[in-house]
Amino acid sequence: MYKVDITKCNGCGICVDVCPYEAIEVESNGRAKIDIDKCNGCGKCVHYCQMKAISEE
């Protein structure tokens, strides 16, 4: 399971673009949110996040 550190996330949306399961969205507050029910744990979001805002929990 992955989580977003909202103090690091800048809302760029790269994680949204690379997620093959459409499990991530950028909310109105400008921060990414991961839907754990859709997440398959592939780790692409962690790899591509330039801000290092996503980590494995």
Image (tube, rainbow, N blue to C red):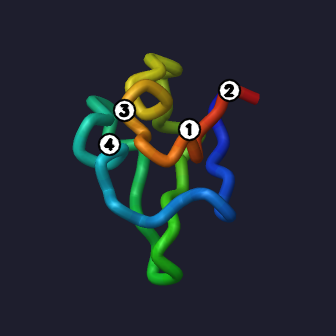
Q: Residue at x 47, y 37 (%)?
A: 38
The residue labelled by disc 4 is 22
Q: Which mark is residue 37?
A: 1
Q: Position of residue 8 (x, y in %)?
A: 61, 57
Q: Mark 3 Cα within 10 Å, few/some/many (few <14, many 20+)?
A: some
For marks 1 and 3, give the one nearer the viewer: 3
| Disc with the residue nearer the chain's start (3 vs 4) | 4
- Say what amino acid the circle numbered 4 marks: Glu
- Which residue is the extreme one toward the top? 42
- Say what amino acid the circle numbered 2 marks: Glu
Q: Quadrant of the N terminus?
A: top right
- Left or right of residue 20, residue 15 in this image: right
- Left or right of residue 33, residue 42 in this image: left
- Which residue is the extreme one toward the front? 51
Q: CA distance from mark 3 to mark 4?
A: 15 Å
With respect to residue 43, does 48 lie above or below?
below
The residue labelled by disc 3 is 48
